[in-house]
Image: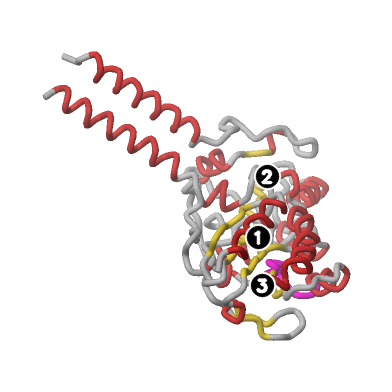
Amino acid sequence: MKTKLLLGLCTLLVIIAFGGCRSRQAANVKSGAGAPDFTVTDIQGKKLSLSDYKGKVVLLDFWATWCAPCLEEIPHFVEMQEKLGPQGFQAIGISMDDGPRPVQQFYQEHKLNYPVAVGDAKLADSYGGILGLPVTFVINRDGQIRKKFVGATDPAQIEQEVVAALAQH
Amino acid sequence: MMTKPSRRTFYVALLLFGLCLISSRPLFADGAPPDPQIPPKQMMTPEQLNDLLKSTKPLILQVGPQSMYQQAHIPGAEYIGATSTSEGLQALKSRVSSLPKNTLIVLYCGCCPWERCPNIHPAYKELRNLGYGDARVLYIAHDFGTDWVNRGYPTAKGE
């Protein structure tokens, strides 16, 4: 009887312990979930809908002009668009700046070759909350989130994920 | 009477429990790490601020982006705007201009990892230059989502 009670207690302790560890992880949109669709107007005044890119591998980058780690990633995304675009890759930038002015200036100065729009809290919420930057999603051809990268990430790691997604048909 | 294997299981479980408790605590539980621009006594960890909020209501100012404030902010915190811009610094100055110099003010941002945040240091410097000696800064190591929201500290949404 005592052994059973002890075993029960042990199990409970382990469950509580691992539960505590798991609570540190972000309770956000998970890999494998459908990427929430959105329609916004990009900084060039064109309509931008995620659903328009179904069939392509999409890199959805939440960034801002004041976010240093974000700015380090962007040249790599430009390069990826150039290199992998013909294979069905599309980068999309969602800036979390408070307004379009700095984004437009940045867009022109850095010659971005993919659409960029200014996002808002509603769009960020639909992706599980963007409460730190950068956050990058790789979305597969079926519109499912394949991978989410939080914080500064080695661009080679992101590209590797995109290339793997492109290889799946 | 405990048998030997069950006693071992118990100790293993206890060890795992302890390890997970330790790992779920902030790295700097007793204080934020040193910062060359902000004296240690002016910095506080999320845990320390959460404890403070149980007994007092300091003026909390969010000096980061609006979209993040709208998604989640510390209850009672006021939105100032990004103090990496002159508009944000002006908004900060205006907000505190009528307050006594000994007002306890807590600044936070959490847009980016601490050492790369463009807002928090200019905001603190501005308050110090204005003579607010009890200006404190919330140390957010990674970002507001990771270090405050995901740790289960209270949040509010909206404008």
Q: Residue under label 2, please give it.
A: B137
Classify 10 Å Cα crowding around label 3: few (below 14), some (14-19), many (20 and above).
some
Q: CA distance from mark 2 to mark 3?
A: 46 Å
Q: Are the residues flagged by discs 2 and 3 from a single subunit?
A: no
Residue A5 among those drawn in magenta: no
Residue A97 among those drawn in magenta: yes
Q: Quadrant of the C terminus of chain A?
A: bottom right
Magenta stretch in the rendered image: A92-101
Name which residue type carries label 3.
Gly
Query: Residue drawn at (50%, 61%), measured in percent from left and top?
Result: A29
Q: Are the residues flagged by discs 1 and 3 from a single subunit?
A: yes
The location of residue A139, given as percent across then percent down, is 58, 66
User: Looking at the image, which is closer to me, B97 or A21?
Assistant: A21
Q: CA distance from mark 1 to mark 2?
A: 42 Å
The location of residue A19, given as percent across then percent down, is 38, 41
Q: Residue under label 3, please give it.
A: A88
